Image (spheres, rainbow, N blue to C red):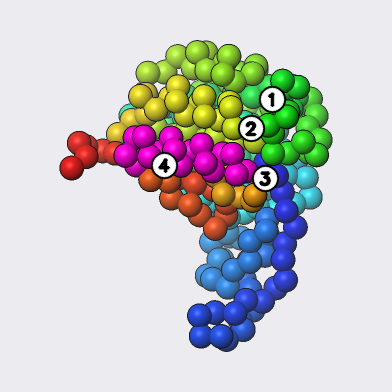
Amino acid sequence: MLLKKAVPNSVRNTFGTVRASTYTEDGLIAARISEFLFSGRFDVAYQLGKSTESWGTMDLRWRVFVACWAAQHVRHLPGDYVECGVSRGGMARAVVEYTEFWNLDKKFYLLDSYCGIPDAMRQSSAVLEFDYSECFQAVKETFAPFPNVRVIRGIVPNTLQDVDSQQIAYLSIDMNCVEPEIAAAEFFWDRLTAGGVIVLDDYCYSDHYALQNKAFSEFARRRDVEVLALPTGQGLIFKPQGPRS
């Protein structure tokens, strides 16, 4: 997960009026209603995610909210949850809290090397400069209170077969490297429940992710769906709920 510093704290709207920004984090500046990002149920979930130290000193509330919203949106659909690219577990921990995952009759599979991007994939990685550290034990401790969360260590795509669920409602992909990201999407697409969602953390975050942007746009085109590109840099893909006309 590549992090950027906030930009200046004012924006000019369509009519040329300069307005004070209400949100300046993670490379995104906005003058919008954003209290929901700093209070209530989401704030609790976000702070628990941040406590894993997944984002260092940075904040990325809106990006985390998108993942939490998507996970909540599909919580009543049949199918389990999968996150490919976990790092220290911040995003998954926020999702678990926001959805009250311990009350769901679902499993949450967390797939990562838990020690960074493999050497064989680093040449095509977007975040060579990011210093990943060994965190497997820390992640296991974070999710130990949740028996329906399964922490799987290894390199994607090798570990995809360890997800034994035949239905997936929520798939989060954030590996900062195009080959395992596309492999995960290809592997799980047929298992994705109608109405299920794929959250692409890297889709349009910056030029560093041009390979992911191109690959997932083509992935969606082949399936006659579209990626919803978001100002957070993420992309959402929803599995169609019925035959396409």
Q: Secondary structure at mark 4?
A: strand
Q: Which of the two discs, 1 and 3, labels the residue nearer the N terminus? A: 1
Q: Secondary structure at mark 1?
A: helix
- Cα separation, mark 2 vs mark 4, equals 18 Å
Check disc 2 and give the amino acid type: Cys
Mark 1 neighbour class, 10 Å CA radius: few under 14, some 14 to 19, many 20 or more: few
Check disc 1 and give the amino acid type: Met
Left or right: residue 117 compared with residue 42: right
Which residue is at the front of the view, 142 or 68?
68
* Disc 1 to disc 2: CB gap under 8 Å: yes
- Cα separation, mark 1 vs mark 2, equals 7 Å
Residue 240 position (above or below residue 168): below
Residue 236 position (above or below residue 173): below
**Residue 87 image offset from top left, x and y in percent:** 69, 32
Q: Which of the two discs, 4 and 1, labels the residue nearer the N terminus? A: 1
Q: Quadrant of the C terminus?
A: top left
Residue indicated by mark 2: 177
Residue range of the region highlighted in magenta in the rendering: 209-225
Q: Secondary structure at mark 3?
A: helix
Which residue is at the front of the view, 43 or 16?
16
- Which residue sits at x=58%, y=27%? 179
- Cα separation, mark 4 vs mark 3, equals 21 Å
Residue indicated by mark 4: 237
- Which residue sits at x=41%, y=42%? 237
Residue indicated by mark 1: 121
